Image (cartoon, rainbow, N blue to C red):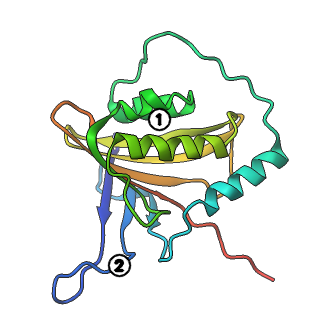
Amino acid sequence: GKSKVCVMYHLTDDDGNDVTDTTAISFYNVDDDGKIVSAFDVTEPVSPKPGDSGLKLLKTVSNLIGDESIVMMTTDSITSSTAVEQYFDAWNKRDMKLAVAQFTEDCSVRDLQYDDAFSNRDELETHLLRCKDCLPSSFNFVIDDIAQTKQKAGVLWHVENDGEPLSFTRGCSFYTLDRNGLIQTGFDIPEKAPPKTG
């Protein structure tokens, strides 16, 4: 079988001080011989952060694509076993109350498209509702791979529209979990779109 490794890191200067805008997350699959068979790396955007500009772009694109999907809500219990998987499931069902219930009350979540962390469930829910309003119900976050221990989880993901992957919507997230398995901290970094040419 293959092993999974997810690493979040940042740079420091010679004096041990953090270097601004250098947080990154890498996700690796390693074979039995210890060789990396796949790798995905995302880096924090430089300041000033793009903020809602990515959401606005996705909203504009979604208006061109259309939103003719049907979202089935079910009362079945969630089959995902971890808070991280349940968070993604709830987000895709657009149930933000259930999504934020996977986080501790005093959670700290950094969407590195933004300058500041969302410092508790209420701030996180406000952010998720803003994202929900910008993305049609046909857009879903799909977990491609997950590496998890009792205290940490790394997730490789992408966005799909009606089951079709969208270009330049992959990303990585890194979470720490409390002793009850709830998400205590989170860091989300989407991949950068390529620069425009010509």
| Image coords of residue 117 (percent x, y) | 37, 58
- Under circle 2, the secondary element is loop
| Image coords of residue 183 (percent x, y) | 29, 40
- The residue mark sitting in front, 2 or 1, is 2
Q: Earlier in the sequence, mark 2 or mark 1?
A: 2
- Identify residue for label 2: 20
Mark 1 nearby-residue class (10 Å; few <14, some 14–19, many ≥20):
some
Q: Nearer the viewer, residue 128 or 19?
A: 128
Spatial CA distance of label 2 from label 1 is 29 Å
- On-image quarter of the N terminus: top left
Mark 2 nearby-residue class (10 Å; few <14, some 14–19, many ≥20):
few
- Identify residue for label 1: 88
| Image coords of residue 172 (percent x, y) | 44, 53
At horizontal 84% and vertical 48% (from top left) the residue drawn is 64
| Image coords of residue 25 (percent x, y) | 38, 61
Classify residue 78 as left or right of residue 184: right
Classify residue 171 as left or right of residue 182: right
At horizontal 43% and vertical 18% (from top left) the residue drawn is 78
Locate residue 93: give its quadrant.
Answer: top right
Amino acid of disc 1: Phe
Locate residue 103: give its quadrant.
Answer: top left
Classify residue 34 as left or right of residue 157: left
